[in-house]
Image (spheres, rainbow, N blue to C red):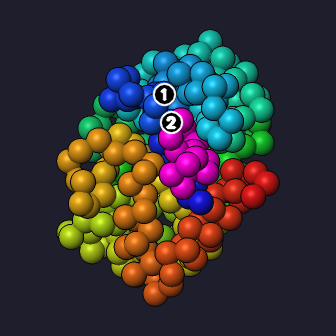
């Protein structure tokens, strides 16, 4: 069975067939999914999915690009909802300098605050970091993220950066980008990262693997990521599924 540790089934891209698709997952090899909040509305929708499907869990947090919507009242609402039984992480949180909006100071402020929230509620974090490696590392170090734990979602940095995150005890979310021909940096990083620190993710509906790149992604496409990871690591696909399942349960502090 496969554990998709990072999906966005609350996204509008699934409005036409969400129920049918989600209902089909267990019979097609997808045992668990963590749906990730990226905005306050996304968190509300994630809570709905957590309640409707036994195999769907949730992470609640605000993506760096949406942090301008946060204020003290909404932050307290977020903290309250993180106490829900099936909320397994705070996320996705972090920094995104590709779009660079809202301004970097706003992003950094709420990244630090959400790391502090995770510490307070005793949950790991799901970190989004794009073109912001140094500031991400600096804030994680200042907030003692090593004591919090979590995962670097859609890891896209070098193996040198991977070494720093490994020293913090973090997991690495690997998805469809691994199958891209031009993903040499990521392939090198995956070769370097120990298998016991890797989890599978889709980030669906985005980052669809080859051979369906450009189409809507779903958890059903993770088998292609498994195949490429097995090739890189020199192990069987069944081993990739088993190890990443155990890793995901460890990341989210669940019973296997």
Which of the pair 129/243 is nearer the observer? 243
Q: What residue do we see at 56% from left, 19% from top?
A: 44
Residue lying farthest to the top in this orientation: 73
According to the picture, the residue beneath numbered tag 2 turns out to be 22
The answer to whether any part of residue 117 appears in the image is no
The residue that disc 1 covers is: 19
Residue at image position (43%, 51%) is 220
Report the front residue among 90 and 167.
90
Task: Give the position of the C terminus as an image quadrant.
Answer: bottom right
The part of the chain drawn in magenta is: 23-36
Looking at the rendered structure, the secondary structure element under dot 2 is helix
Q: Are marks 1 and 2 in contact (CB under 8 Å)?
A: yes
CA separation in Å, label 1 and label 2:
5 Å
Instruction: Check residue 33 for magenta coloring.
Output: yes
Identify whether 113 is placed above or below 76: below
Query: In the rendered view, does 151 fall on the left or right side of 94?
Result: right
Residue 109, image x, y percentages:
51, 33
Residue sitting at x 69%, y 50%: 252
Image coordinates for residue 176, horizontal then vertical, percent: 35, 58
């Amino acid at each position: 069975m496969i554990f998709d540790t990072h999906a966005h089934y609350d996204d509008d891209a699934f409005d036409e067939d969400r129920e049918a698709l989600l209902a089909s997952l267990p019979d097609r090899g997808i045992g668990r999914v963590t749906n990730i909040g990226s905005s306050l509305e996304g968190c509300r929708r994630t809570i709905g999915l957590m309640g409707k499907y036994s195999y769907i869990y949730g992470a609640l947090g605000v993506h760096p690009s949406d942090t301008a919507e946060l204020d003290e009242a909404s932050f307290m609402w977020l903290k309250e909802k993180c106490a829900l039984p099936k909320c397994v992480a705070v996320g996705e949180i972090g920094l995104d300098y590709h779009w660079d909006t809202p301004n970097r100071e706003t992003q950094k402020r709420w990244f630090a605050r959400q790391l502090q929230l995770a510490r307070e509620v005793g949950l790991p974090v799901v970190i989004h970091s794009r073109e912001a490696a140094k500031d991400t590392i600096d804030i994680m170090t200042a907030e003692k993220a090593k004591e919090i734990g979590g995962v670097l979602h859609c890891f896209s940095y070098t193996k040198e950066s991977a070494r720093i995150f490994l020293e913090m005890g973090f997991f690495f979310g690997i998805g469809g980008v691994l199958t891209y021909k031009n993903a040499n940096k990521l392939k090198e990083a995956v070769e370097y990262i120990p298998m016991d620190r890797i989890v599978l993710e889709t980030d669906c509906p985005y980052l669809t693997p080859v051979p369906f790149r450009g189409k809507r992604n779903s958890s059903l496409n993770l088998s292609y990521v498994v195949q490429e990871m097995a090739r890189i690591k020199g192990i069987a696909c069944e081993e990739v599924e088993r190890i990443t399942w155990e890793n995901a349960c460890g990341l989210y502090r669940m019973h296997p």
